[in-house]
């Protein structure tokens, strides 16, 4: 191996007159790839409260509370401050009630704002069958 | 000269390998070194016993942010062996593809970090700029830049389509060109070579006795690579060479990694061109049969080994993880002895302990407790009044 | 009248105010160029093109809390940054920038002022050493020791290289040296080696890559500055910046024939020439990796000093021929 | 390279070995059980005569009835696990650092996590657990459990 | 006038100290990534500093581990006022997948006050920049 003084200079000078490779974020948003794993979102009308998502979520980010047994009223809380955006819940959900959108710039100054609650009643069997098609 | 002991670290970003090095030095020369782990210790092994096999995939992934795929692959391989699942070939190929892309990103990252440790910021900037190309490829394959979450028990979660394949080939082309340039640069730039050659010598016998792994071992003339010695997944089919160097120093480790990157780029190309058709995964049972398994994997930094013992439930009985960096610490201590203070970061970076932030931590240990501050700007202070620090946090033990 | 002129000279141009503004501009220029060499943008949104970035840094530090480590000697620890700043500013006053009458030298131009400037420029190094030593932090102490070790390396070649143009010009006065080379610009061609040696030594004096050994972040955190915060850090940073301006101004005076004419043209020439020197410094910073302190000493005694001696020989021969 | 059945035969036929059991559940994996007192001897034999020079790691399992310690050795052709079972009431085992110095960190880890006393360990200080860790708490024992502290989210209504 | 100068300079020059309190490294890498040519946070005047004495913003990654807890507090105290803390990643917010592990507190806000939370595991570098920009906005309105 021979040493050459200043081998890097040509490369450096070449780039001096090139456009920098810096993107102008945050003034221009970046393109996201298709299927980017952003934030999990629930479609309450599809959820049959089977709790597969709760069981499989590695970060305990989903909680389902029963508000009323007779009315079949439930509250699902997605803790975005715990979520690791792995999309396992989407995969586990038998009805496709959960999906990932592509939001990722959700920084805030309070953890409370990251907690998303859905209050819903469990849909009737028929309605749910329908939407599966 | 007076001997003094200085703390380097207390904390190092890798999960299993958070570290505090205590150096005893005389002037600028290191006389002795000692390691203390535990700053990053989170108790993953215990935690794993209380999580299901599926949840554990994601836990394993988060052992480490650089070789995240290594840990999941090693883990799912083990679980698949336990329940005797036959993973479809396409699944294995995609897994290997992500493995190699990860190796490429890790070695690019490492080259940058090594340059940064040597104070060569321009090279750091250039390599990391080019690393973005790999990150983009990984993102289009898996949907996330770092924790790909592509492995699942029984195969992989996402398939590849034609557009993605094309993009990967394009990226590989570009990366190969750049890596060749960096090979040339890294081995001919006098100030850089002056910093890395002859530094951190680890002779062959010592490397063996101290159980070094990965590029650190290979830079000491030993051609050991789990991908060749104990082929897992689809690695039996890929043509590639095990790269070694015989200088036994940091320069050798640079050379090994650079060569390996080029090999990996070739493997990626091979995988894309020979990707078999078919399913990508098979369904896995939730409960895993009783048994035990040792799973080995060649991570970018060396051998990664998981020992899994199952007891027939949906949670493992015992999950032991040995990440490669840990295996290299005894060797590192050997290398540090009689080196210069200036070489600590380089030698340390040479085993690639995900040092990228290893020195950012460098806690300026200021043992005099509660160094006093003069409040010149009382007003500002009031304005930025903060909630109290919770010093009284009690550990429930 | 003379007093007012001198006050203006001290405080406004080319004294404090000018040096402050121009040094922040130079820092911006250096950072921007360095960033562009690395294919990035560099400071961009503070003022136009980020030109006010160093100013913002300075004021922010000025208004931050200021911590003195408990074990450190409070008086020394706090006074060092101010002394350092004072030395570089006074070194700056000797640059032949405004009222340099060759026949009637004023208070800031006299035979031998080149030596005074060189010594004033050595002082910041000592101050850095003291600052490191008095921080009582291990990393700072190590940084301080490295500062001193490096000083032995680069000081001799720097002096030899800077003095050799003076030998040819047969004067120890900056204004006269500059004037001499304005009359005989071709003689500068014989000073190329000296210029190279002096720029490298200046890079070492400013502790920039590849000689940023005393505050190598990856090795010893902030080196000598580790314990400094708030105002004191602001002054130290300003000190380094002004040192860079004065150093490159010195290079421009002795190796590039100085700055002639009245206030405005001389200012323009000054800016142009110092920016050329600073560009070279930035390019060096981007091209190399940091070397070890022992390598640095070996380098300067094996290559820099012999080259500087060679330059001195050439100068003496040239002197003999033209004299 | 030797195939594992051949290797097993060779180990079995080797004079001076005192194995309780040897098996190979899958390719290139060998499990060997020995008595604690024969541990050092076996490891030395495996290293000197069969090329298992590399300690990949040492893991332990709490089997309630006893502790099981597994030494994962590796050569270029296979991975071999030496299993010893030790008494839970008097957990002690010899250090193998005399044979393979690279095992030191793993032994320290085992010591921390299971509270197993390693006899003749060159460096007995704790490795992974925090400095202020209370004594006689060994996280990986099955009878040790941990209740996480309640989380207080700042700004949350109490 | 002075007030405005102070505020202006503070917003324009946030120097960060990167502190890993037991993270898996991915967040750290993404923070470093934000410094490199593609994202280049130096545009905003952000510099990465090695010493807490020089920093204004502590960027924390990782769930606070037991061993790190005291050090986090000490580093926080060593940083001169005014100082701000950004928690990057699910770990620093809540402990992520390590919730319930014996050596993890779970979330850096259990130890020191946090100003901005950046979700993600790891957050993309642009999400981190977004978090810092939100911190600066918060400062502006203070
Ligand atoms: S339907 Fe699936 S998730 Fe529900 S109880 Fe049966 S196996 Fe479990
Ligand atoms: S994406 Fe993963 S972490 Fe987030 S809610 Fe779904 S399963 Fe849980
Ligand atoms: S979201 Fe899906 S997985 Fe979760 S409870 Fe509802 S239906 Fe079940
Ligand atoms: S050696 Fe591998 S497993 Fe360990 S921290 Fe580094 S990347 Fe992660
Ligand atoms: S892998 Fe081992 S060292 Fe790491 S957290 Fe788990 S128990 Fe601790
Ligand atoms: S040490 Fe290894 S495993 Fe850990 S983050 Fe770094 S590369 Fe990954
Ligand atoms: S370890 Fe520190 S200095 Fe090195 S690359 Fe990472 S952030 Fe930069
Ligand atoms: S938030 Fe995720 S990526 Fe970041 S440190 Fe934690 S586990 Fe790693």
Image (tube, coloured by chain):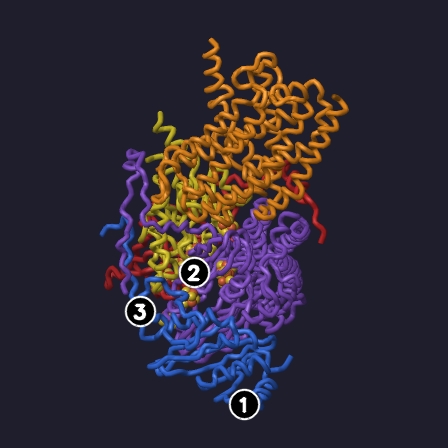
Chain colours: A red, B purple, C orange, D blue, E yellow
Q: Nearer the viewer, residue E101 or D137?
A: D137
Residue most extreme to the top: C1
Residue that numbered label 1 is attached to:
D16
State whether residue C23 is above or below residue A92. above
Residue that numbered label 3 is attached to:
D135
Instruction: Estimate how packed mark 1 is, as few (under 14), some (14 to 19) or many (20 or more) residues with alpha carbons within 10 Å.
Output: few
State whether residue B272 is above or below residue B123. below
Asked if labels 3 and 2 share a chain, the reply is no
Residue depicted at 40% across the width and 39% down the height: C229
Residue C56 position in % (x across, y down):
44, 32
Q: Is residue D143 left or right of residue B298?
A: left
Q: Which mark is residue B5?
A: none
Residue that numbered label 2 is attached to:
A90
Q: In the rendered image, is residue A130 in sight?
A: no
Q: Is mark 1 within 8 Å of ligand 5?
A: no
Q: Nearer the viewer, residue D53 or B265?
A: D53
């Amino acid at each position: 191996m021979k040493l050459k003084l200043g081998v890097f200079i040509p490369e450096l000078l070449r780039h001096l007159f090139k456009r920098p490779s810096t993107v102008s974020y945050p003034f221009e948003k970046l393109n996201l790839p298709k299927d980017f794993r952003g934030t999990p979102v629930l479609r309450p009308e599809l959820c049959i409260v089977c709790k597969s998502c709760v069981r499989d979520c590695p970060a305990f980010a989903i909680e389902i509370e029963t508000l009323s047994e007779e009315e079949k009223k439930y509250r699902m809380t997605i803790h975005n401050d715990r979520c690791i955006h792995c999309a396992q819940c989407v995969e586990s959900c038998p009805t496709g009630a959960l999906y990932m959108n592509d939001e990722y710039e959700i920084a805030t100054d309070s953890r409370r704002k990251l907690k998303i609650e859905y209050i819903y009643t469990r849909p009737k069997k028929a309605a749910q069958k329908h939407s599966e098609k | 000269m007076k001997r003094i002991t200085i703390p380097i670290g207390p904390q190092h970003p890798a999960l299993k390998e958070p570290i505090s090095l205590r150096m005893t030095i005389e002037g600028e020369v290191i006389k002795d070194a000692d390691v203390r782990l535990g700053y990053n210790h989170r108790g993953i092994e215990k935690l794993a016993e209380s999580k299901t096999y599926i949840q554990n995939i994601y836990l394993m992934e988060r052992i480490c942010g650089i070789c995240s795929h290594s840990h999941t692959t090693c883990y799912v391989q083990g679980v698949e062996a336990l329940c005797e699942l036959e993973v479809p070939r396409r699944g294995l190929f995609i897994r290997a593809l992500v493995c190699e892309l990860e190796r490429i990103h890790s070695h690019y990252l490492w080259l940058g970090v090594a340059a940064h440790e040597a104070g060569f910021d321009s090279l750091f900037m250039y390599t990391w700029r080019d690393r973005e190309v790999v990150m983009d490829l990984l993102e289009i394959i898996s949907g996330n830049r770092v924790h790909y979450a592509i492995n699942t028990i029984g195969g992989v979660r996402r398939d590849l389509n034609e557009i993605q394949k094309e993009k990967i080939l394009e990226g590989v082309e570009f990366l190969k060109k750049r890596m060749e340039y960096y090979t040339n640069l890294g081995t001919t730039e006098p100030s850089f070579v002056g910093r890395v050659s002859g530094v951190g010598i680890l002779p062959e016998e010592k490397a063996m006795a101290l159980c070094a792994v990965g590029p650190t071992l290979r830079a000491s003339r030993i051609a050991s690579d789990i991908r060749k010695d104990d082929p897992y997944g689809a690695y039996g089919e890929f043509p590639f060479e095990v790269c070694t160097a015989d200088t036994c120093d940091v320069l050798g480790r640079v050379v090994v990694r650079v060569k390996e990157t080029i090999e990996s780029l070739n493997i990626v190309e091979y995988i894309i061109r020979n990707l078999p058709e078919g399913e990508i995964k098979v369904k896995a049972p939730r409960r895993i049969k009783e048994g035990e398994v040792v799973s080995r994997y060649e991570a970018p930094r060396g051998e990664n080994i998981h020992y899994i013992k199952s007891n027939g439930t949906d949670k493992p009985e015992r999950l032991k993880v040995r990440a490669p960096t840990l295996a290299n610490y005894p060797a590192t201590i050997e290398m540090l002895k009689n080196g210069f203070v200036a070489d600590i970061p380089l030698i340390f970076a040479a085993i690639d302990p995900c040092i990228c932030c290893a020195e950012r931590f460098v806690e300026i240990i200021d043992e005099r407790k509660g160094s006093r501050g003069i409040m010149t700007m009382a007003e500002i202070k009031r304005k930025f009044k903060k909630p109290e620090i919770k010093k009284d946090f009690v550990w429930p033990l | 009248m003379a007093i007012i002129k001198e006050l203006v000279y001290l405080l406004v141009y080319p004294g404090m105010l000018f040096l402050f503004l121009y040094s922040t501009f130079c820092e911006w220029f250096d950072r921007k160029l360095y960033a562009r060499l690395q294919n990035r943008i560099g400071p961009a949104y503070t003022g136009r093109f980020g030109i006010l970035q160093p100013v913002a840094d300075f004021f922010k530090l000025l208004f931050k809390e200021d911590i003195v480590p408990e074990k450190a000697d409070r008086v020394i620890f706090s006074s060092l940054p101010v002394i350092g700043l004072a030395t570089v500013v006074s070194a700056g006053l000797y640059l032949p920038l405004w009222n340099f009458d060759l026949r009637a030298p004023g208070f800031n131009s006299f035979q031998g002022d080149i030596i005074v400037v060189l010594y004033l420029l050595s002082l910041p190094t000592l101050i850095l050493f003291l600052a490191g030593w008095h921080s009582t932090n291990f990393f700072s102490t190590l940084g301080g020791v490295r500062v001193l070790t490096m000083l032995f390396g680069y000081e001799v070649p720097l002096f030899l290289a800077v003095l050799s143009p003076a030998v040819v010009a047969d004067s120890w006065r900056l204004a006269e040296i500059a004037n001499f080379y304005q009359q005989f610009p071709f003689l500068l061609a014989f000073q190329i080696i000296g210029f190279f040696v002096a720029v490298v030594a200046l890079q070492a004096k400013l502790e920039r890559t590849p000689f940023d050994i005393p505050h190598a972040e990856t090795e010893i955190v902030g080196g000598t500055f580790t314990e400094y915060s708030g105002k004191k850090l602001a002054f130290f940073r300003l000190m380094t910046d002004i040192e860079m301006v004065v150093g490159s101004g010195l290079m421009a005076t002795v190796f590039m024939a100085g700055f002639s004419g009245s206030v405005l043209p001389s200012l323009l020439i000054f800016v142009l020439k110092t920016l050329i020197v600073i560009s070279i410094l930035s390019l060096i910073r981007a091209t190399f990796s940091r070397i070890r302190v022992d390598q640095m000493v070996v380098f300067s005694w094996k290559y820099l000093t012999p080259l500087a001696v060679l330059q001195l020989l050439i100068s003496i021969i040239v002197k003999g021929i033209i004299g | 390279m030797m195939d594992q059945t051949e290797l097993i035969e060779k180990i079995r036929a080797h004079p001076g070995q005192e194995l309780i059991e040897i098996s190979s559940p899958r390719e290139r994996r060998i499990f060997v059980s020995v008595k604690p007192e024969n541990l050092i001897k076996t490891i030395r034999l495996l290293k000197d005569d069969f090329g298992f020079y590399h300690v990949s790691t040492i893991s332990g399992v709490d089997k309630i009835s006893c502790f099981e310690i597994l030494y994962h050795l590796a050569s270029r052709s296979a991975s071999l696990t030496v299993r010893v079972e030790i008494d839970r009431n008097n957990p002690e085992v010899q250090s193998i650092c005399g044979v393979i110095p690279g095992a030191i960190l793993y032994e320290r880890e085992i010591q921390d996590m299971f509270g197993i006393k390693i006899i003749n360990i060159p460096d007995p200080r704790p490795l992974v657990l925090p400095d202020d860790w209370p004594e006689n708490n060994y996280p990986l024992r099955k009878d040790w459990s941990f209740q996480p502290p309640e989380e207080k989210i700042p700004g949350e209504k109490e | 006038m002075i007030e405005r100068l102070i505020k202006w300079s503070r917003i324009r020059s946030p120097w960060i100290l990167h502190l890993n309190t037991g993270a898996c490294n991915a967040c750290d890498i993404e923070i470093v990534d934000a410094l490199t040519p593609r994202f280049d946070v130096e545009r905003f005047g952000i510099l990465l500093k090695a010493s807490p004495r020089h920093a204004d913003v502590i960027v924390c990654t990782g769930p606070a581990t037991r061993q790190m807890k005291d050090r986090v507090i000490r580093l926080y105290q060593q940083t001169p006022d005014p100082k701000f803390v950004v928690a990057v990643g699910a770990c620093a917010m809540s402990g992520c997948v390590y919730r319930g592990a014996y050596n993890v507190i779970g979330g850096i806000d259990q130890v020191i006050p946090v100003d901005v939370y950046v979700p993600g595991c790891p957050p993309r570098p642009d999400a981190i920049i977004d978090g810092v920009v939100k911190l600066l906005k918060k400062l502006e309105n203070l």
